[in-house]
Image (cartoon, grey):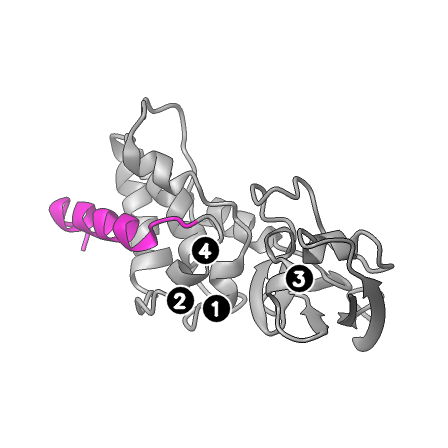
Amino acid sequence: MKTIFHVLRQSDKDSAPYWEDFDYETEGEADTVATALMRLPVQWDCSCLQKKCGACAMVINGVPALACDTMLARLKGTMVTLEPLRKFPTVADLRVDRSSMEERLRQFRIYREGTADHGADATVLEAGGCMQCGLCLEVCPNYYPGAEFGGMAAMNPAVRVMNGTEGKHLKSLRRSYVKTVYDGCGKSLACRDICPAGVNIEKLMTEANHDLRKSRAI
């Protein structure tokens, strides 16, 4: 079956975007958007192609998703529209610069200084499922580039670090969490519904907020 890929392309970050169509002949029922992209002359990011790294995040038929996790057989029609994530600077074609997520974690000190023995803590394991793909930020009505609010992309690593950390650094992390997550979240939970890893975001948020109230950080 032939599929037409309608791709929003951009030569580099300073170029004007334009649309271009590509024909793709489906090889089998297991074909994904990533399968097709490997045969198209379009720039995009990929790594594991197994729904583990989040590198191939993009907007597919208007919906943020992972290319490796989107099967062509499940898409309606014979045309597939591909666009880069809108809340990150475009590098080229479907490639975007998501370094702002890492920079925000450094800026607001959401990282662990020293070590903490988490063991097999269920909360840490749940939060560890986050791939930092950025899909949660793409659909978040409260997140915009340059905002202090870091969204769930900041919450997951923050929860991982706060759980098991003690002393002065924990107090600093709690203040950072309040500033980067708690104060800006409207709890639309669009992030929960879009998360390709199925992270139980609402559960993690509830536990983190309970910790803040218990410690009187809020």
Amino acid type of the residue that numbered disc 2 sits on in the rendered structure: Ala
Q: Does the magenta stretch include residue 80?
A: no
Towards the viewer: 37 or 57 = 37
Residue at position x 78%, y 54% from top? 27
Residue at position x 81%, y 77% from top? 18
Q: Do the residues labelled 2 and 4 touch (CB within 8 Å)?
A: no
**Quadrant showing the N terminus:** bottom right
Question: Mark 4 — residue?
Answer: 195
Q: Which of marks 4 and 1 is in front?
A: 4
Q: Position of residue 92 (x, y in %)?
A: 78, 62
Amino acid type of the residue that numbered disc 3 sits on in the rendered structure: Leu
Q: Is residue 32 above or below residue 172?
A: below
Question: Mark 2 — residue?
Answer: 190
Point out the tag, 2 or 3, that comes first from the N-terminus: 3
C-alpha separation, residue under disc 4 versus residue under disc 3: 20 Å
Point out the tag, 4 or 1, that comes first from the N-terminus: 1
Q: Does the magenta stretch include residue 214?
A: yes
Towards the viewer: 35 or 190 = 35
Question: Mark 3 — residue?
Answer: 72
Q: Where is residue 209 in the image (x, y as percent from the top left)?
A: 22, 52
C-alpha separation, residue under disc 1 versus residue under disc 3: 22 Å
Question: Mark 1 — residue?
Answer: 139
Q: In this view, does 125 lie above or below 59?
A: above
Amino acid type of the residue that numbered disc 1 sits on in the rendered structure: Val
- Read off the magenta span: 198-218
C-alpha separation, residue under disc 2 versus residue under disc 4: 9 Å
How many residues crowd around disc 2 within 10 Å: few (fewer than 14), some, or many (20 or more)? Answer: some
Find numbered disc 2 in the image and state the secondary structure of the residue it sits on: helix
